[in-house]
Image (cartoon, rainbow, N blue to C red):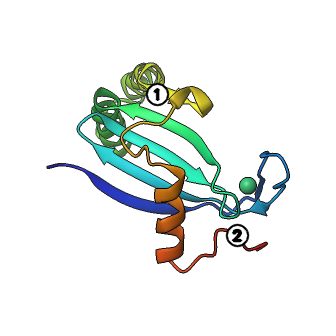
């Protein structure tokens, strides 16, 4: 199997737009990686509303790895390197879906699952904080 999960804490605060929630919080982003690519999403810790941030295809991950390699490659001629970087960035963009359009992908879980997970992690899904 090739599915992994990691978490990224975002410093910036966002406001939940769910009706009657209005919770302001710094998202803890769940990054799921599997054979179909990578998916970034988070939930409001108060109401568990899901927010999809970005989805990158498997091909996109390969492009990203190549992009990082090119950026790190100091032996390449500057002009050639810059051209390659813009080419790879454009390819990366084509393999990336942002915002709500990214949709629930491999990490898709029910509200109950999310609430169970939140309580396992010692976070009270119904608290005001
Ligand atoms: Zn909320």
Residue 19 horizontal/vertical position (percent) = 83, 46
For image coordinates 80% across by 61% down, the residue present is: 24
Q: Which residue is mark 2?
A: 126
Of circles 1 and 2, which is in front? 2
Residue 7 horizontal/vertical position (percent) = 46, 62
* Residue farthest to the left, as pictured: 1
Position of 80 with respect to 113 (left or right) is left
Q: Which residue is mark 1?
A: 96
Q: Quadrant of the C terminus?
A: bottom right
Q: Is residue 2 above or below residue 125?
A: above
Residue 125 horizontal/vertical position (percent) = 64, 68
Secondary structure of residue under mark 2: loop
| Quadrant assignment, res 127 | bottom right
| Quadrant assignment, res 69 | top left
Residue 2 horizontal/vertical position (percent) = 18, 49
Badge 1: residue crowd in 10 Å (few <14, some 14–19, many ≥20): some
For image coordinates 60% across by 54% down, the residue present is: 43
């Amino acid at each position: 199997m090739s599915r992994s999960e990691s978490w990224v804490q975002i410093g910036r605060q966002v406001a939940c737009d769910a009706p009657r929630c209005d919770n302001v919080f710094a998202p803890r982003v769940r990054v799921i990686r599997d054979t179909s690519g990578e998916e970034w999403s988070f939930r409001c810790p108060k109401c568990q509303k899901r927010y999809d941030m970005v989805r990158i295809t498997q091909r996109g991950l390969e492009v990203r790895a190549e992009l990082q390699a090119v950026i790190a490659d100091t032996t390449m001629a500057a002009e050639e390197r810059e051209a390659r970087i813009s080419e790879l960035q454009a390819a990366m963009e084509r393999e990336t879906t942002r915002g709500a359009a990214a949709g629930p992908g491999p990490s898709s879980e029910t509200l109950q699952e999310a609430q169970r997970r939140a309580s396992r992690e010692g976070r009270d899904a119904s608290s005001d904080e």
